[in-house]
Every structure is written in structure tokens, then in C-alpha cells.
Image: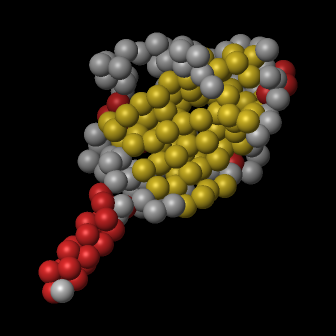
Amino acid sequence: MKSNIFILLLSSFLIHSSFSPSMVKPRFEVEVMQDDDYVDPDNNIIELQKMPFTLRVKVYGLNGVYLNASTDPSLFELPGDKTVPEFEFISMKTMKTEAQNSDKDLILAKGYYSYLTDSKSDDGIEMHTFNRVEKGDGFYTGYLDIEKFTKREDGKTLPVTKMKEPVYLFFMGIDADGKEMGRYALKLEWR
């Protein structure tokens, strides 16, 4: 009887600890949604209608994910075994935007990043928080609604409905020690 109780308690502990947030492998997943449907990429290329869309980012064991959005394909074309240019300066090249992205804007800027997170910064990094967040056990899912783009270089804003050129999205997770924990690149084309 004692051995059965011990086995039950040990099993419960092992099952619970295997789902503990501190045991979660740091990573993230990205999906694009339009008109409440997920749009599947074909070779990391997504064809969207010229209408608002949502980036859905599921984050495990990281505070947030860096996002570079640009009309320049250089990060999209960067081989996976090559270091991201100016990797050591990414936190300094992070742009400040509206809290909870209330203007539903995505800034297009070669060489600059948004930091997508569900929390406030302890280390001075300006936040580009999600429009809404759903929290789970050891992860959170953030939704970034996009209705327009602003080009950092000239400050011009263009609604998604008027976009003609492709937009390249480059996501990267970095752990607390400054180590890259994954990257994901997408090309958005318009129909």
C-alpha cells in the first residue's frame, strides 16, 4: 500500500514538473491569420488579400520575440547558419511603438526591430506589446493586428489595402543570456 502511494505521488510530481514553465524549452511559433482563418505558407511565402491581418505568436519560455518587418529581403534570405547582422546591438535597435499596438500599425524598417512581449521591460528595452494576449501554463499567445504599415525611413503610412510591394517578416527569439533561440522568416505577398 505504501509503495502504491509513493508511486502515485512520484508520478504526480514527475507529470507536474514536466509541464512546469521553468522546464519549457524556449521557442516560439508564428502563424498568420486573415478573416479568422490561418493562412498556410508555401516555402515561407504567404499570399494575403489586401485587407487587415493578424500575426499570432505563441511564445514558450522566452520573455518575447524580436520582429524585423521590412520591404528589404536581406534577413528573409539570410541562411540559417549565418549570424544576424549586428546581432549584439539588437536590443539597442528596438523601436518604441504604441502600447498594445492600439493604432494597429506595423513599422517597416531595415535593420530595426519591434519587441513583441506580454510584459513590461526590466532592462530598458522598449516594448511593442500585442493587441491581446492569452496566457497558458509555460507559454503565452500574442495577437498583433495589422491594418497599416509605416515606413520608418520617411514616416509615410500606408493601409494594407494599398500595399503593393512584398513585406518581409523576420522573427527571432533570444534568451536571457543573449543566445539566439530560433528564427523564422516570412514573405508576405498581396493579391
77 left or right, relative to 191: left
Q: Position of residue 121 (x, y in %)?
A: 47, 58
- Among the 4 quarters of the image, the one containing residue 152: top right
> Which of the pair 75/51 is nearer the observer?
51
| Whether residue 17 can be seen here | yes
32 left or right, relative to 65: right
Q: How is the image coloured?
A: secondary structure
Give above or below for 53 relative to 130: above
Residue at 67%, 28% (x, y): give it.
39
Q: Position of residue 183 (x, y in %)?
A: 42, 30
- Among the 4 quarters of the image, the one containing residue 151: top right
Residue at 76%, 46% (x, y): give it.
103
* Residue farthest along the left direction in this orientation: 3
* Residue farthest along the front direction in this orientation: 1
Give above or below for 45 relative to 175: above
> Which of the pair 160/184 is nearer the observer?
184
Quarter of the N terminus within the rendering: bottom left
131 left or right, relative to 111: right
Residue at 20%, 79% (x, y): give it.
4
5 left or right, relative to 40: left
Give above or below for 33 relative to 132: above
> Which of the pair 139/99 is nearer the observer?
139
Residue at 28%, 40% (x, y): give it.
179
Quarter of the C terminus within the rendering: top right
Q: How many marks?
A: 0
Q: Position of residue 85 (x, y in %)?
A: 37, 22
| Whether residue 97 can be seen here | no
> Which of the pair 12/57 is nearer the observer?
12
Q: Position of residue 139 (x, y in %)?
A: 46, 55
